[in-house]
Structure formats: C-alpha cells, structure tokens
C-alpha cells in the first residue's frame, strides 16, 4: 500500500505541472461553491456567489471538455517495428549490436579507451525540462507505460556530451544533467512508440530522436533527457558470475535475466564535481548491485568501465557497462537460486527483482567482430558451460531464461575486454 500511495502521489504531482491552469480553475470553482453551502451569511453573498459559480462552472466545463478531447485524441500505440529502428544510425557509434531485445550502437574504439580514460564529470546547473509537445502527452504516456506498475519519480542523471574515441582518449570533462524518471518516460521512452493525434501520426522520432537523414541527435543537442543506464557484471573470487532476474514490473526487462546490477545513474552517485567519470559510473553500478542482490558492500572489489552504447529502442539513451571483482566466493553469497524471497515483502526492491543466482564463468580468448551490424559475441564464445546456454525459438537463454539487452551488451563488452584475461 505504501508503494502504491507513493507512486500515485508522484504521478499526480508530475501531471499537475502540465495542467496547472486547469487545476487552478478547478480549485477556484470549488472555492466559489463553498460559501453557498456555508451555514452563515448566505443570504448576503449568495446571489453574487451564485453568478460567479455559474460563470466558473461554464468555464470549468469548457476546459474539462477541451482537456478530455486533447487526452483522448492522442494515443500511444504499439512499439515501432524493428525495420523502422534499423534505419537509425550514429556516426560516432558505427556498430549496431542486435540483441534479442533491441539494438544498441557501440564503438569498439570507445570501449577500448574507457578503462583508462581521464574524463571528469561536471554538472549542468540547469535541470532537464520535457519539451512542451512531449509534456502535453504526459497523461497518455504515463497511463500506457505504467499499466499494472507503481514506479516512483526518482532523480536521475543524463549525459550531455558525446563520447568519441578522441574525446575518451584525450580526456577533458563531460556534462551531466539532473532529471527525473517520469520526465524520461515522457521523452526518451516515448520514442519507442507510435503516437497519434486524432488518428494521424505525430512522427515524434523525426523531431526528437533523429534528423532528416536518420542520424541520431548528439547528446549535447538532443531535446531528450539522455538518462544514463549503468550495469555491472559481478564475478566472485572463484569465478562465478552473478545474474539477476527482473520481475514482471520491471520497465525494460520484464521477466528477463539482467546484469548483476543494472539501473540508472542518480545524482547521489556524483559525490564531488570534477571527479573521474569512471568512478561515478562504477559507484552507480555497484549501488544497483548491492540494492538488487543484497551483496555486502565490503565485498566490492575493483570495478572497471568496459563499454558504452546508445540503446535505440529507448530513445538512444546512453548505457555504460562495467565488470566488478568480488572478494567473496559464490558460497558466501546470500542467494543460491532465483527466489523472489531474496527481498522482503516490504522492500521496494521486491517489486523489481525476482532473485539472483551465481553461475560458473570461463575466460575464453578475447574476440572481436568489426562487422557494422552483428549479434552479441557471448553466446558462442564459451563463456558459460554448455549446459547453461540454450536457445528457444532462436532466442539465446542462460539457465533456461531469456536474456535482457543490457546483459547481452555487457557480456559482449566483456568478451572484447583485454583485461578479462587477468584479474579485473
């Protein structure tokens, strides 16, 4: 109940920012009617209040009708078909990584430079604001993407600097920007859907996601939030990889296997402005790791940022991938199999994670594939025991469970990471 009430409060508070004039009119109407039912003095102020109430009611009903027409005329439809997403590209990220759950654009040269980059993180003083066109769609969007779910409107950080091989190698600063979860849902996440107004397509992607050539807008010029996803692969001292199972209420990976820790970068992950970007990313990824698996923070060892991508199916949002070395063994972990009881029923994490499991992992030779469009490399590289890897209707599975896009991308980055052959 507490979770539902918090989610409902966050949602209404967010929506009122886009319909504040209507809310103010409704408040004025109620205030105008109250004196009419007040037990004292109504014969003096009654006629005047009655006239004001009638006028207010007319305006209130008119605005109600206009608002109803606006909201019912705009529909969030089906997700865009793969053939549409396949037309998008980004010059700085020339390789399309085609997972079973979406396309992520990567650049092996960027990934190779990330572990030792000197990039630092600075914070934009301006907070992200949803463009008016998208803000007007907020009620329809939140209703569609939150069906059966009760998310909170938590704070997030977006990325405002494009990562190119030269930028990552030369260092300098990258800009982060504060935002929130609901704003990202109404902007970045909306780019995955076909939205109509009165039956006509609004073609939002051609305005906010890509230019006329189908090229992704740069993070510095984009009107989307660019909220940052962070994931890490946690490996125990005896070479077991921790995997989590996302619940049916997860936003992007419902019922799928995910990295050891996977979520969004938050303002609290930036402790000191100007600190190394890789430390901020690693801190956020390990925070998610501890929250989702209940791993003791004291077991967290060295963490390396090994990959970067932009997820086309989610508005081109930036994703960072890490590998974390744990000082504990698999036997010391607080879980054995995927069990929803890992988190207590009153824990917020109970809503999003259905348990965790550690499986043996190998260290095969480093491989890469320069193809501009390819599948992730992990499934045929001998990372896991043959008994753990299988296929169902062409979809790769680990331990009989389907794999999320962040996990496939993280494993692909790990396969290509030279430091994998030694202690991370």
Image (spheres, rainbow, N blue to C red):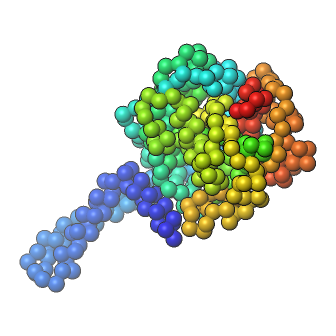
Q: Is residue 306 visible?
A: yes
Residue at point 47% right, 30% down?
275
Residue sticking out furthest to the left: 44
Q: Is residue 201 above or below residue 141?
A: above
Question: Is 299 rendered above or below residue 83?
Answer: below
| Image position of 278 (left or right of 79) | left
The percent coordinates of residue 279 (x first, y second) are 54, 33
The answer, for residue 204, to whether it is visible in the render is: no
- In this view of the protein, which residue sits in the foreground, 140 or 405? 405
Where in the figure is residue 411, as x and y percent of width and height?
75, 37
Most extreme residue toward the right, as rendered?
A: 386
Image quadrant in which the C terminus is located:
top right
Q: Nearer the viewer, residue 258 or 141?
A: 258
24 horizontally vs 400: left or right: left
Answer with left or right where residue 411 lies relative to residue 384.
left
* Residue at image location 71% in from the left, 37% down from the top: 410
């Amino acid at each position: 109940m507490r979770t539902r009430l918090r989610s409902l409060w966050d949602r209404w508070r967010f929506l009122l920012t886009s319909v504040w004039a209507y809310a103010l009119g409704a408040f004025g109407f109620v205030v105008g009617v109250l004196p009419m039912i007040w037990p004292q003095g109504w014969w003096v102020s009654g006629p005047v209040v009655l006239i004001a109430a009638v006028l207010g009611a007319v305006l209130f009903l008119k605005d109600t009708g206009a608002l109803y027409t606006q909201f019912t005329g705009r529909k969030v439809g089906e997700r865009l078909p793969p053939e549409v997403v396949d037309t998008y590209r980004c010059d700085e990220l020339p390789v399309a990584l085609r997972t079973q759950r979406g396309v992520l654009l990567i650049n092996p040269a960027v990934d190779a430079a990330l572990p030792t980059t000197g990039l630092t993180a600075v914070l934009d003083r301006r907070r992200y604001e949803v463009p008016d066109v998208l803000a007007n769609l907020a009620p329809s969007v939140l209703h569609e993407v939150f069906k059966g779910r009760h998310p909170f409107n938590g704070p997030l950080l977006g990325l405002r600097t494009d990562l190119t091989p030269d930028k990552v190698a030369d260092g300098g600063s990258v800009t982060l920007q504060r935002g929130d979860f609901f704003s990202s849902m109404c902007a970045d996440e909306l780019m995955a859907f076909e939205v109509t107004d009165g039956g006509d397509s609004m073609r939002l992607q051609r305005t906010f996601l890509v230019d006329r050539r189908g090229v992704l807008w740069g993070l510095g010029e984009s009107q989307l939030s660019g909220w940052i996803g962070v994931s890490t692969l946690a490996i125990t001292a005896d070479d077991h990889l921790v995997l989590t199972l996302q619940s049916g209420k997860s936003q992007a990976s419902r019922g799928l296997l995910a990295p050891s820790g996977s979520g969004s970068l938050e303002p609290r992950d930036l402790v000191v402005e100007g600190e190394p970007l890789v430390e901020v990313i690693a801190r956020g990824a390990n925070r998610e790791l501890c929250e989702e698996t209940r791993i003791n923070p004291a077991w967290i060892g060295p963490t390396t940022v090994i990959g970067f991508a932009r997820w086309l199916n989610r508005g081109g949002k930036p994703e960072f991938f890490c590998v974390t070395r744990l000082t504990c063994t698999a036997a010391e972990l607080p879980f054995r199999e995927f069990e929803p009881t890992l988190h207590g029923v009153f824990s917020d994490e109970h809503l999003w994670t259905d348990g965790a499991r550690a499986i043996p992992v190998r260290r095969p030779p480093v491989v890469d594939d320069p193809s501009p469009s390819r599948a992730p490399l992990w499934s045929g590289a001998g990372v896991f025991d043959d008994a753990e890897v299988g296929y169902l209707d062409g979809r790769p599975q680990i331990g009989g469970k389907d794999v999320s896009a962040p996990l496939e991308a993280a494993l692909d980055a790990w396969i290509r990471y030279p430091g994998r052959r030694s202690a991370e």
